[in-house]
Amino acid sequence: MRMKNQSTEKYSKEHIEFLRERKKETFKIKFLQAGILLALITLWEVLAAFKIIDSFIMSSPSRIISTMISLYSSGQLWSNIIFTIVETITGFILGTLLGMIIATLIWWSSFTFKVIEPYLVVLNALPKVALGPIIIVWMGAGMGSIILMALLVSVIISIMNILNGFTNVSKEKILLMKSFGATKIQIFKKLVLPSNISTIISTLKINVGMSLIGVITGEFLVSENGIGYLIVYGGQVFKMDLVMAGVLILAVLAWCLYACVAKADFVYSKKK
Amino acid sequence: MKNKEKILMLKHLTMRYHTLKQETLAVKDITLDIYSEEFLSIVGPSGCGKSTVLSLISGLLSPSSGEVVITDRKKDLGKSLVGYMLQSDYLFEWRTIEQNIMLGLEIKKLLNEKSREYALKLLEKYELIKFKDHFPNQLSGGMRQKVALIRTLAVKPQILLLDEPFSALDYQTRITLASEVRKIIKTERKTAVLVTHDISEAITLSDRIAILSKRPSTIKRVLEVEFGSQNLSTKQKQRHEKFNDYFDVIWSELNENEKSKH
Ligand SMILES: Nc1ncnc2c1ncn2[C@@H]1O[C@H](COP(=O)(O)OP(=O)(O)OP(=O)(O)O)[C@@H](O)[C@H]1O
Ligand SMILES: [Mg+2]
């Protein structure tokens, strides 16, 4: 609809000027962002090269790169990345699904909600790392524990977010549905769920991050595989190059996962 | 009134609300007969219990005592006796206009070729058909409220309950839409019960006006509105000599309420 208008309408000079200004600004922002990054990396490298900072403690860009290359050639790079990704995605999917299901059940019965609310609040506030040792004792030091950790971190926040969206549906709209004689299932399917699509998507965005936090926490504790393991191991043997390389990979990974969910959001809002 | 057949009887309706802090007697012993195809308005001080009366009629609330009797003369096709129209349109933003007007039919599981066609006919008749694939946010307030009315009419209710349906609109739109809605309701031969704050709206739209007292609300007075001719426009009614008389009567009834409060 709107797209069509844009291509058929002829713009005024002023509007073209406005668009050009906007484009210029976007370019400036991108340019500066890249510039800052490049400057920092160069500064870091130069400081390390002239031994102004101790590259044994601070590492340096070139050392990080060579660490990555050696990780790559020994086959450790991809295997660890894949471990972390699989764990994160599994935790993310399970956490989100479970969160949605539990939120729906709680919404269904306001009595249950009243009963369960203080538990949710406490669980939400509790740092989930504290549960790490318990999980490992119960589940063993393996992938299962890590995924459970990711799930725990993301599920509570999902429940809280989605439930909040569900209970905030306007009372008048529910009244309208009831005036047509709607059942609870109909109210859920035709009103509560569709009006909360954007809540659910924003929960997804939060959850990728949450799940990754859970996975790295888990890998720190279990210490077998994954980027979290690389970082912990690097710290233990005092190889700061490895720690820095791990952090860098993690940053890229976090960005990629977030971009995937943001893409889903974009596709959805465009469809609308 | 041409038609004196009773369609709706309120018998000694009383309604109490209970909250932890208090008990509110909102409606006290209201008895009123409503006739088929009439347009009845309910006016009263704010918070007196007007919306409560509508909720009781619709069955969304059950009275503490008394009863609502609806005489179902057409032995009903779809069990859609009462339709509710609220202050705001509450159209669903994620549905197109067409999907919005089908909402009631979907909920009542009455959506089929015939009923869909009927709903679309209404859209066409009231000049909204070209917006059927638009989303609500692309329509003006008045148009949206008309869509809400069509959504209500689509399930073929015999009685329409209107709870201040125009109060969210600007003055100009309100006047046009109000007379348009009256026309639609008369054309479709529906019975309407309208709650309003606006005295002149009540006079120009209604066949009868029930004036409620302050809470707990009882009926103070029921006024027949008669302008001689059936087909006067809103403007003509407002200029009619009887208009001011009606206005004064209602005004003083309502203000007596105000005074007795202190
Ligand atoms: N669900 C409820 N629980 C408790 N009290 C209520 C409830 N709904 C309404 N009341 C009280 O009942 C009284 C009548 O409310 P109602 O909404 O029927 O009045 P109204 O005449 O429609 O008011 P307004 O002019 O503001 O629309 C008010 O005092 C209100 O506070
Ligand atoms: Mg009200």
Image: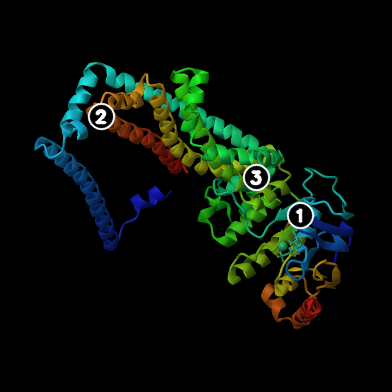
* Mark 1 secondary-structure assignment: loop
Q: Is residue A4 left or right of residue B222?
A: left
Pick the front one: B251 or B257:
B257
| Residue B3 in sight | no
The quadrant of the image that shows the N terminus of chain B is bottom right
Give the residue at mark 2.
A245
> Residue shown at 47%/27% (left/top)?
A132
Chain of the residue under label 2: A
Residue appearing at x 36%, y 36% in the figure = A259
Residue type at tag 1: Leu
Spatial distance from mark 1 to mark 3, Cα to Cα? 36 Å
In the image, which is nearer the foreground, mark 1 or mark 3?
1
Q: Chain of mark 1?
A: B
Image position, residue B77 (x, y; %)? 79, 43
Instruction: Name the residue type under label 3.
Output: Leu
Name above or below for residue B39 compared with residue A151: below
Q: Position of residue A211 (x, y in %)?
A: 44, 32
Q: Nearer the viewer, residue A13 or A167?
A: A167
User: Where, by quadrant of the figure, is residue A72 drawn?
Assistant: top left
Q: Position of residue A51 (x, y in %)?
A: 11, 36
Please indicate, yes or no, whether residue B132 appears anywhere in the rendered image.
yes
- The kind of secondary structure element at disc 3 is helix
Q: Which residue is mark 1?
A: B20
Q: Quadrant of residue B6?
A: bottom right
Viewer-nearest of discs 2 and 3: 2
Q: Residue at x 25, y 50 (%)?
A: A29
The chain under label 3 reads B
Q: Which residue position holds label 3?
A: B103
Q: How many marks?
A: 3
